Image (cartoon, grey):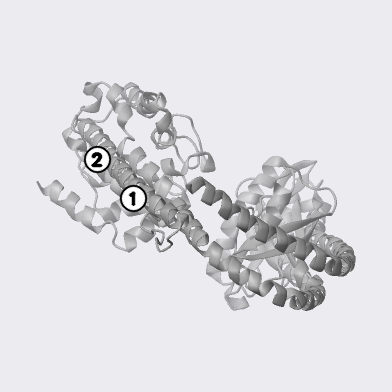
Amino acid sequence: MAAERQEERTFRIGIFWVLSVLLVLLVVVPLVSYSWKTIATSRDYIEESLRERQLKTAIPAASHIENLMYAHQRHLEDLVGTFEVFANDTQFKVRFEDLLQRGILGRNLSDDTLLLTYQDQEGGQFTTPWKGITTAEQAQLTSLVLPLGRQAIEANAGRSSEVFFVRLAAQRGLSLPAMALALPLHSDNRPVAALTAIFLLQGVQDSLEEYSREFGMFVTDAHGNLLFTSDPVKQGKPMNLSDDPIVQRVLATGSFPTSAVNYNVTRTAGRKTETDLVTCAPINAYRWLLFSQVDREKYYAPIVALRRQSTWWIALSIVSALLVGLVLARQITRPLSDLTEVSRDLAHGNFHRRAEEKAKMEIGELARAFNAMADDIQEYIQKVEAAAQETQQLFMDSIRAIANALDAKDPYTRGHSERVSAYAMIVGREYGLDEHMMRVMEISSLLHDVGKIGIEDRILRKPGALTAEEFEVMKTHPPKGAAILGGIPQMRDIIPGIRHHHERWQGGGYPDGLKGEEIPIQARIIGVADAFDAMTTNRPYQKGMTFEKASARLNELTPAVYDTAVMEAFNRAYRSGAFLPHQQTVQAAKLA
């Protein structure tokens, strides 16, 4: 009987919707089809016109930027040519110095040439800053250009930096784009010195604004880093746009475009969908990308309004006929809609909501059966969550037990792993790691010395400094730790922090000699936390430093050993007092 009632109800609702669909097809479609076809043709014309204007704007803008950059390069090349007039003179050094003393560098400075530096192979240097630069600003900028000059001499070729942003007091502290360029000076066709300049690229930024009157424009490098933009809010703010759909579309191809390309990018913000028309024009000489974008819907607004108006009048003519049917449909579908909403809530994890059971027909029975099922599911989920929480706690307790057992082999390292983990979590949180990486960090830091299980006790417990041979054995504990956990698939994210926490930022660490970004971020943070605890606790071969001295020592070793970004996070956390509770505990342990 219930099945018959279900079939009867389904048949009634089916007839209603069939009639409604037929009514729409017979009344609405013939009236709307022609107007929409006309509107679609107009939309295509507008889009084609926009595309054409974008290309005619983006390509000249890219060419103009390239010419502006070439002008800076030619400026430095002309200055190099002045020096190399004496390239074949046996007294070229004297000639070069004479030019410098006569102020040739100063005569080549301008509002967009902030700094000119001459440096030779022996390390001698002569720097002339723009008149508006302070002594502190000059020192900072000089430290940027000297390595570039050395590279130009060693490579016997020009070298340029990435675009960076400077704040100058003479420019009201605004963040302005700049770039360093170094060219070698020759004598007898061999490099003997280099000229390095820092050029202010505000002219490039201003030119971009001139071309962006109709379209939004911005320029990135081949890695998606923002260099110039017509958006005043983003100007002077370093940011990476590689995840932006507009930039990602080009970078995802894996190859640098050789000519301008057009494409569409659709974005969804809440219920609103926007489509940008994009033109990407390459600036080949510097491997930069110029993007021109415009919101297509802004130009479609009149057409959209026309379509809305025509649709409104068509809908108005049939709304009275459908009104009664819609009211009846609402009465029938309301209980099912409510049950559907409750089902969606249940699917999204809201196990507390229940369906109303007011209906007296089969829908009411369905609601009661559904609520009973929801009760069972909620109870089961609660049991699963409790078991998962208990398992997680047992896992972390086991990890801590292993770390404590390992630390207990040496009285001087008792509690070392717990403290390293605590320090690493403080720095990781300040660095901005997400929840998953913080969990990986916690386990990696607790087990960072697990490889010492494979190190002989005579070496671990040796009261004095290790011999070279013993230190080589001790250096095997990171790969041994990675090997111990390597057979556990669930530990694959944990292993990098264990294996690489003794690598050095500029290379020379162990076991793999990684450097820079090659070192996993959790390993860089654990390395800082491990060193900080080693410095601040008593060891057989040294007395523990104060937290303040240890912090200063870590900063001295940056960036040779430690990542500057990680140390900045460490310093912020230290200044905020995050280490204070641990400082008191360590101090008490020293006095015990």
Label 2 residue SS:
helix
Q: Quadrant of residue 577?
A: bottom left
Q: As shown in the figure, which amino acid type bears the numbered disc 2?
A: His
Q: Earlier in the sequence, mark 1 or mark 2?
A: 1
- Whether residue 225 is visible, yes or no, is yes
Q: What type is the residue that disc 1 sits on?
A: Asp
Q: Where residue 317 appears, x then y in whole percent?
A: 77, 77
Q: Residue furthest left?
A: 592
Residue 383 location (% of width, % of height): 29, 43
Most foreground residue, 521 or 588: 521
Q: Judge by depth and name the residue closer to the eye, 125 or 156.
A: 156
Residue 518: numbered disc: none
Label 1, on which residue? 375
Is 302 situated left or right of 319 in this image?
right
Q: Is residue 346 left or right of residue 274?
A: left
For label 1, count other residues whose C-alpha is less than 10 Å away and answer few (under 14), some (14-19) or many (20+).
some
